Amino acid sequence: MSIANPNPMPLLNVERLSKSYGSHHVLKGIDMSVAAGDVTCIVGPSGSGKSTLLRCLNYLEVPDSGAIFLQGEPVGMRWRGEKLYRMSFNELSVQRQKMGMVFQGFNLFPHKTALENVIEAPVIVKGIGKAQAAEEGMALLDKVGLKERAHYYPRQLSGGQQQRVAIARSLAMQPTLMLFDEPTSALDPELVGEVLSVMRQLAEEGMTMVVVTHEMSFARDVADHLIFMDGGVIVEAGAPNDVLSRPQHARTQSFLARVL
Amino acid sequence: MTDHTPQPQRPDIHAVTPVPVRHPSRWIGGAILLVLAAMFIHLLATNDNLKWSVVWQYMFDKEILAGLGRTLLLTCLAMIGGLAIGIVLAIMRLSHNPVFQTVSWAWIWFFRGVPPLVQLIFWYNLALLIPVLSIGIPFGPQFWSANMNDLITPFSAALLGLSFTESAYAAEMIRAGIQAVSGGQTEAAATLGMSKSQTLRRIVLPQALRIIIPPIGNDTISMLKFTSLVSVLALPDLLYSAQMIYARTYQTIPLLIVATIWYLLMSTILTLIEHYIEHRLSDGKPISISRIVASLFKSRFWTSRRAEASL
């Protein structure tokens, strides 16, 4: 998967990102970058700040300090002359369209069918015609193997099926980057595989992905880059095989000893 | 300690059916209620003071029907006014602006705490407090003004009192409905690039409505009954029309029965409509009249008003 990137500018760049809730420092100065087409997996014990980091990337959580750049543009902030302004919610929504997000709890719209979930944003936000959106939506549902379930409501679908619809829903906005926040953690063990295989397929197609996960075998097989976080800092990062097989830090070693 | 008395000869346990548990209390209670019900029906049928012929005579009397019309109009307008103010109050309550939050809280606190009857009388006497109503720049020049006595009729006083009371309850129900939609829904909409108003219109409100509509329906039924309070303002609604007739004819009981029958009929129709809507909202199941009628007996309509409003 690792193709040498001729473009020196990474798709996503995170610089000195910090976030705290009250006196609790969740993120203590995170630096990372993601090249276009790469899959980055973030692993670490619970409470290490990995989900907060992911939610800061599309400003679902507003970081206290630091900056995020998507294709060189600052996220959530904008220059006007020499002054830096925070973006309003609706300005942010334009940037968020470029970053699809898949949640641990699926968060499908329960009052809409699978297909309606997928075409909602293209129709409402992008103003694409319903017929065209439905055609593209069916193609996406076919891609995640749920064409036959297009007219089912979320409550009529299993957890794995719901998560696959959620992936299709994000893809419908044609994002340049996909964020996955523990996408298989709420699933019964036998349903994890179907979601991971859709994610593998996406990675093979060259989608840029940042995945917070506990699935170590997925990280080893699919990721180009593995980040181990603990206590709000990146402890160790590198090629997945190096980090998983030859961890340098004691904290990484003890975490891997517990999960592998 | 062992029992040495010989065991009686018993049949095989698998070959016999056990005698079911008896419920004598159910039979005794049922019998007492049946007797009381029979006495009540006997009273209705034989008591001469009821004068059923007078009841039927006034059932479709012009005055009574005009009063019924006013009752329905007042119910309808008070609900519309109450819901409109309630939506604004709910959004104010959920906003991040502390001034909005506090004003909304104070409004709800006041109008939930003051009995509607006190309010009706208060609004009716508003001219004593503010003799002239004028529109203009605050503490500055005035563009338009009118005598409060001309503005406050029994009808407008009743409308103010009833819709302000309703607005306080509606605001709490709408707020609860919006808050019941999980935060994950707005997050999912945000990551898809939807704006705040798109999220509210397309994602939050459709889900909140399913929660809000049943208690709003209940409140409409309650409002129908609450409108009878306006008789203190001499507004000829259904009750006051009946009162005016019996003031002339002294047929007090028959005319109260006329009003009672109309109130019962209207609230039953409203209950049926409410259950129809509620049924349509729940999971999109097919509508069947028998299920709606069956659900009537489990209705919150029969329980006390406002119990569900304080969600």
Image (tube, rainbow, N blue to C red):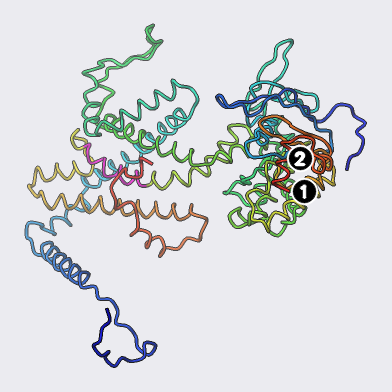
In three-dimensional space, the C-alpha distance between marks 2 and 1, rounded to whole angstroms, equals 9 Å
Q: Is residue B240 above or below residue B277?
A: above
Residue A45, quarter of the rendered image: top right
Magenta span dominant secondary structure: helix
| Badge count | 2
Marks 2/1 in contact by CB < 8 Å: the verdict is yes
- Amino acid type for the residue under numbered disc 1: Phe
- Amino acid type for the residue under numbered disc 2: Cys
Q: Is label 1 in a helix, a strand or a loop? A: helix
Tell which circle, 2 or 1, labels the residue nearer the N-terminal end. Answer: 2
Q: Is residue A166 above or below residue A61?
A: below
Residue nearer the viewer, A238 or B267 = A238
Residue A101 spot, x, y in % from top left: 69, 39
Chain to which mark 1 belongs: A
Give the residue number, with chain letter if any, for mark 2.
Answer: A41
Work out whether disc 2 and disc 1 sit on a shared chain: yes
Residue B152, quarter of the rendered image: top left
Horizontal side, residue B243 vs residue A246: left or right: left
Residue nearer the viewer, A18 or A82 = A18
Horizontal side, residue A218 vs residue B86: left or right: right
Residue nearer the viewer, A190 or B13 = B13
Residue A103 spot, x, y in % from top left: 65, 43
Give the residue number, with chain letter if any, for mark 1.
Answer: A218
